[in-house]
Image (spheres, helix red, strand yellow):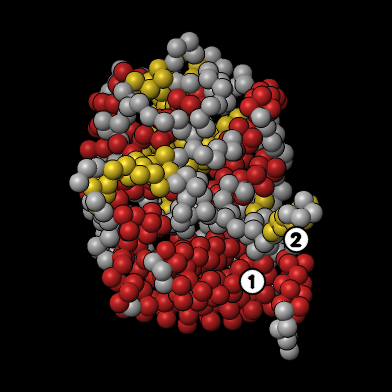
Amino acid sequence: MSELTKEEEILKEIKDKFSDAVENSIIQRKSRIWIDVSENAKLDIMRYLKEKGYYHLSTITGFDEGEKLGAIYHITNHKIIINLRVRTQKENPILKSVLPVYPSATSYERELEDLFGIKIDGLPEGRNYPLPEGFPKGVHPLRKDVKLEELNKMLNEKCIKEE
Amino acid sequence: MSKMQIPLGPQHPALKEPENFMLVLDGEMILDATVNLGYNHRGVEKAAENRNYIQDIYLIERICGICSHSHVSCYINAVEEIAKVEVPQRAKAIRTIVAELERIHSHLLWLGVAAFELGYDTLFMYTWRDREQVLDCLELLTGNRVHYGINTIGGVRRDITKEQADEILKKIKYLHERTSYYVGVVTEEPTFLARTQNVGKLPKDIALELNAVGPTARASGIEIDVRKDEPYFIYDQLDFKVITYHSEDVFGRAVVRVLEVIESIKIIEQILKNLPEGPISVKVGWKIGPGEAVFRYEAPRGEDIHYVKANGTEYPERVKVRAPTLANFQSLPYCLKNGYLADAVITIAAIDPCMSCTDRAVVYDIKKGKKEIFDWEELRKYSIEFYRKKGVKFS
């Protein structure tokens, strides 16, 4: 498939350079690469990608797979999106901040903290985002074990108590 | 003089949306600025996981009142990619028309808001009057002024008739004339120039580093546009320019937007004169996946990105939305720093944060203590009656 040469090139470069860190990878279609990487090598890979012109961090998607939590970093040079996926354990989940490489990531990392309860190591203290002040502590609404009905009930009760 | 910290918002004096800017001032100069968001978290991503794919179209459409077509198109393209659906050309063309009409409506709305923030109310009234023409086009095509509901998984819900196409071409022609006039106003009118040039500077290297998107980035000389970089719908078959400007200030952002309106008009004319024939949708099952997809879309404000993960059921496993305004908020504190307090409002407005409007009003009768909800017709009747009682004659 000659139309995927650019995708194959960059994937091969990453695989060659960070052979221990790449756990799984796939070229899904034109302009879409998905790579599962280890948390330890994440920042080095990002630094390398940024040098190669992948300067734009579009966003970070958090996810809950049941046994593990994780995040996908959607990084692009505006032609190809490289989706780097890292995972962390559910007990005391922790990921390193990517702010040293992508300074635009502040809001996206706060989202991971608020909505998934993943501690971001290296993220400066700041106000909650996107959950409001006074949202029940320790409740991370996008985790799969938080059911919508329970969440609604809890928030309604809280409103009544405050009134 | 000692430093002073003042809050701008969250009951915002300029934009009808809750956000807070903490400004550190030395006299009238802004030394530092922090953006605080999250006053209006609605939990759309959680809600999307608990609705099926069709219901999610209508939920996601309501993320924003202005970019409603953008968000849905972005989501729907991701879903269609997972479901491996080939959308008919005619459906793609209709989606493109609605997308460009939305861009015109959004940019004209922005120009009005920007003029209003500058105290240039004549321009505000003019642009919003002309924006009605686009909203009429959208209503004619989709039945709605704001949430169009044109998209469905596998295509669009309404076809375009010959009469509709002619009517839109007529209105678009009028808009072309008007927009050419606005290009003149924005680039020549001394008040506009005085208030926008060298205000809210965002140099190219900073814009790149902080990942600015859309007209904000393009006004700093960065040539990015998802419509060109990763063409979706039928953009690869169309002839249009990516507008960039190198002044790196609020003025540049205004110029980029008005010129983009002209490009959008050109796009719509091209499609309507050469609309592909064929069906407007294909049938897609309720169950999608398993699989995952990420999709980028050029909304009026810039790159919109959605991630959808499907697990083979009727409900998505995960939907992630990142609207362009959030990306542009990262560079906003930089734009505000070293500017004057008086320019803060237009600098914030220059990234075009979203706002929404509605054609209904709630009236509280204090004496009777009751509340009534007026729709447009009732409100109109009420106002005519009100002025008639005062002796105004309607002829």
- Displayed quadrant of residue B223: bottom left
Amino acid type, mark 1: Asp
Horizontally, residue B147 falls left or right of residue B249, namely: right
| Helix, strand or loop for disc 2 | strand
Residue B339 in sight in this render? yes
Q: Residue furthest left?
A: B1
Mark on residue B136? 1
Coordinates of residue A75 in the picture (x, y in percent): 36, 38
Q: Residue furthest front?
A: B367
Q: Residue furthest top?
A: A91
The residue at the point 48 percent across, 42 percent down is: B322
Q: Residue furthest bottom?
A: B395
The residue at the point 41 percent across, 69 percent down is: B119
Amino acid type, mark 2: Phe
Coordinates of residue B390 in the picture (x, y in percent): 72, 79
Horizontally, residue B274 falls left or right of residue B191, namely: right
**First in residue order: circle 1 vs circle 2:** 1
Please tell me which residue lies in front, A41 or B386: B386
| Helix, strand or loop for disc 1 | helix
* Viewer-side label of 1, 2: 2
Coordinates of residue A153 in the picture (x, y in percent): 70, 24
Coordinates of residue B59 in the picture (x, y in percent): 65, 44
Relative height, residue B66 to residue B43 (above, below): below
The residue at the point 41 percent across, 31 percent down is: A127
- Displayed quadrant of residue B289: top right
| Badge 2: residue crowd in 10 Å (few <14, some 14–19, many ≥20) | some
Mark 2 lies on residue: B374
